[in-house]
Image (cartoon, helix red, strand yellow):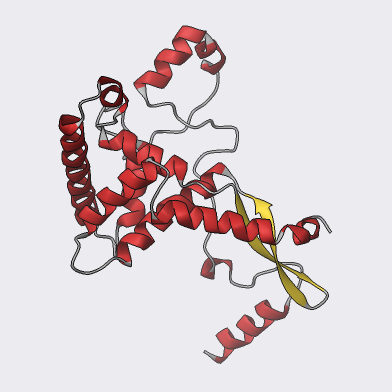
Amino acid sequence: MALFAKYLRIGSTVKHGFQAFPQLTTAKYSVYPPHFAEPVYKKQELDKLYESGEIENYKLIPFKAAKSNETCSIFHDPMVAKFINYMLLKGQKKLAREVLEKTFEKIKKLQLEKYNRETDPEKKASMIIDPVVILKKAVANSKPLLKLTAVKRGGSFYQVPVPITDKESTFYAMRWFVQCGREKDKSISFADFMATELIKASNNDGKVVNKKLDLHKQCEANRAYAHYRWS
């Protein structure tokens, strides 16, 4: 034990990134080399490649194997699967999937009630009934364009507005939905609250859209520190 502690101290003091015990750290390796391309498993995407003729460019390119949860089934949607992963708590994916199915059922009922009450044919035609389409539209309306990051200058930290990637903005939007659902009143079920919030967000309204607008206002207020991003 003393010898282990001795080598552990040596490994922690050696500079230039040397690690005495590499097996104690998480190895970030991939089974596939970097030149392997991501798999195309959706039938619609494959049809587009065949129609455009781009499939000829992929004949000699090695592809990674598709993951076990990636399927060409019409019932599989990547955004829905990602939203389920953000919802789950303590690995209870079955429960998260059931809650989202109840949310979709509630959205369908609410939208059908509005559709049947509406008398104007133009408004009826513009109404969205599909819960998956409403989810995608709600997430798209809740994506922020900027974020605040802390930058140290002269011994002080400044909140600097910086652009945000599409992947990170999707993460922010989905996380805000889940956070608002967990902060709701206990008398309301998670599925009912989430259904109402998704419908509001699809119409550019609701708590999550207000969170996005508040973040944009903070970025606008701190625009004087934007040059710290490059300095």
- The reply to whether residue 228 is in sight is yes
49 versus 136 height, above or below: above
> Residue pushed farthest bottom?
2
Percent from the top left, x then y, of residue 149?
Answer: 65, 62
In the rendered image, the quadrant that contains the C terminus is bottom right
**What residue is drawn where x is 76% and y is 57%?**
226
**How many numbered marks appear?**
0
Above/below status of 227 relative to 205: below
| Residue 224 placement: quadrant | bottom right
Q: Position of residue 168 (x, y in %)?
A: 53, 49
Q: Residue at x 70, y 68 (%)?
A: 18
Q: Is residue 73 left or right of residue 34?
A: left
Q: Is residue 226 above or below residue 183?
A: above
Residue 221 location in percent, x, y? 68, 61
- Asked whether residue 67 is in view, the answer is no
Q: Nearer the viewer, residue 33 or 118?
A: 118
Name the residue located 65 percent from the left edge and 70 percent from the top edge: 19
Where residue 6 sits, quadrant-wise, is bottom right
Going 42% across and 21% down the picture, which residue do you hit?
A: 45
Q: Decide which of 36, 96 is in the foreground and name it.
A: 96
Q: Nearer the viewer, residue 90 or 211?
A: 211
Residue 129's place in the image compared with 53, above or below, is: below
- Image coords of residue 47 (percent x, y): 40, 14
Q: Which image quarter: residue 158?
A: bottom right
